[in-house]
Amino acid sequence: MFQKPEEQLKIILKGVHVVVNKDELLAKLEKSFNQQKPLNIKLGLDPSAPDIHLGHAVVLRKMKQLQNLGHQIIILIGDFTGRIGDPTGKAKGRKALSDEQVRLNAQTYCDQIFKILDAEKTIVNFNSEWLSKMTFEEVIKLAATTSVARILERDDFQKRYNNQTPIGIHEFFYPLMQAYDSVHLNADIELGGTDQTFNILMGRTLQKHFGQEKQVALFMPLLEGLDGVEKMSKSLGNYIGIDESAKVMLKKVMEVQDDLIVKYYELATDEHPDVVEQVKSDLANGLNPRDIKLQLANIITTLYWGKEETKQALEYFTTAFTNKDIPENIPELLIEIDAETIVDIIPQLIEREFVKSKSEFMRLIKQNGVQINKEKINTDDLNRVLINGEVLQIGKKRFIRLIK
């Protein structure tokens, strides 16, 4: 049984940046409710960047909420369009991927998205299934559905045209192909980030041309990373990966800026809109943001790791980061972005003269003379991923706070 359309609408619109349009969405929900028939929900994934963090997961969390409401989720892997390359936001065309790259990236995507979506209730399609079979005549007819002027309305094409940067004719087909995917799937709703606005709206145009009911477009906002300014990005080091350990994930969520707590509740959790309103009220009434953030960290970590591992992560966090035996004013070691593990930071420890050599550091480990957060480490821990803010103790008196 579906929930009432008004309640579904409330849940669906939580955190949404733009909806095109709300009245159409309500009408679709009412029709679905009356017929007890699920809507087709489409999300296209570009198989060029397979490592998913909480920023990427914003649209997947919304898909999960729609799935929980009983609708049919369709994940569309753009393996055919990936061979062309979407130049979104770029000054020049994106390099096309090989078939092997697309296949490997797509598999990595699927492994990760099913940490969020229910695999048994999700359809995964590859658009090569239909696009690769189109005849040249069909391609020409598809191209005839729009004009060059319309395609040049897309910001990146317009900028490149004005700057006299070359645009390949084949690049014009990318938004057309993505739009045709919606026609083939008879999509009722398509989700995407704000950077996909033109492509998704093109889907509405093409569906109308083919006599279909136009899909509703839901655009999700970008999620700022741990620096509180830039959008979450692995290259900037301000990300929270969905495959990171429960301990790392929980600690990173605790580093989220206070003014982003509500946004993370809206975009990174499946909490009901009423819960989000209560969080806003609690913050406005002076409740300690750290306490609310601890609840947020617990919710997000549980979504990806379950209750038991989250409980252990919470216990570790409480012990490691509130330990009174660690001095307050201790030197800090700024860890380089590509340094993830204990063994990675040994050169920096030597450079800062915390240890004389790698052999000395290894000898101290074997003698139980190295600790992280008051826990002794051994050689098996050398590849352990470091968490921002942890305290490394070498010997009895050398304490270093690790800053990522």
Image: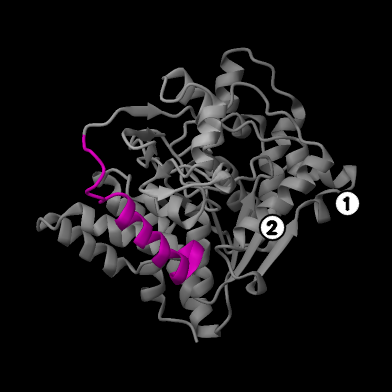
User: Which residue shows up at 46% across the image and 18% down it?
Assistant: 351
Q: Which mark is residue 183?
A: 2
Q: Which mark is residue 8?
A: none
User: Which residue shows up at 37% across the image and 42% down it?
Assistant: 390
* Marks 1, 2: nearer the viewer: 1
User: Which residue shows up at 36% across the image and 74% down it?
Assistant: 6
Is residue 305 a member of the stretch shown in magenta? yes
Residue that mark 1 sits on: 133
Q: Of residues 241 and 186, which is closer to you in this image? A: 241
Measured as percent of width and height from the top left, residue 343 is found at 56, 35
**Can you say whether 98 is above or below 77 in the image?**
above
Is residue 119 a member of the stretch shown in magenta? no
Measured as percent of width and height from the top left, residue 171 is found at 71, 31
Task: Give the prevailing secondary structure in the magenta stretch.
Answer: helix
The amino acid at mark 1 is Lys
User: Which residue shows up at 69% across the image and 51% down it?
Assistant: 108
Asked whether residue 13 appears in the rendered view, the answer is: no
Extent of the magenta region: 303-328
What distance separates the C-alpha of mark 1 from that of mark 2?
15 Å
Query: In the visual, does 210 lie left or right of 257?
Result: right
Asked whether residue 242 appears in the rendered view, the answer is: yes
Q: Of residues 191 and 158, which is closer to you in this image? A: 191
Assess disc 1: are there few (<14), some (14-19) or many (≥20) residues with their C-alpha within 10 Å of its C-alpha: few
**Can you say whether 132 is above or below 392 in the image?**
below
Measured as percent of width and height from the top left, residue 29 is found at 47, 73
The amino acid at mark 2 is Val
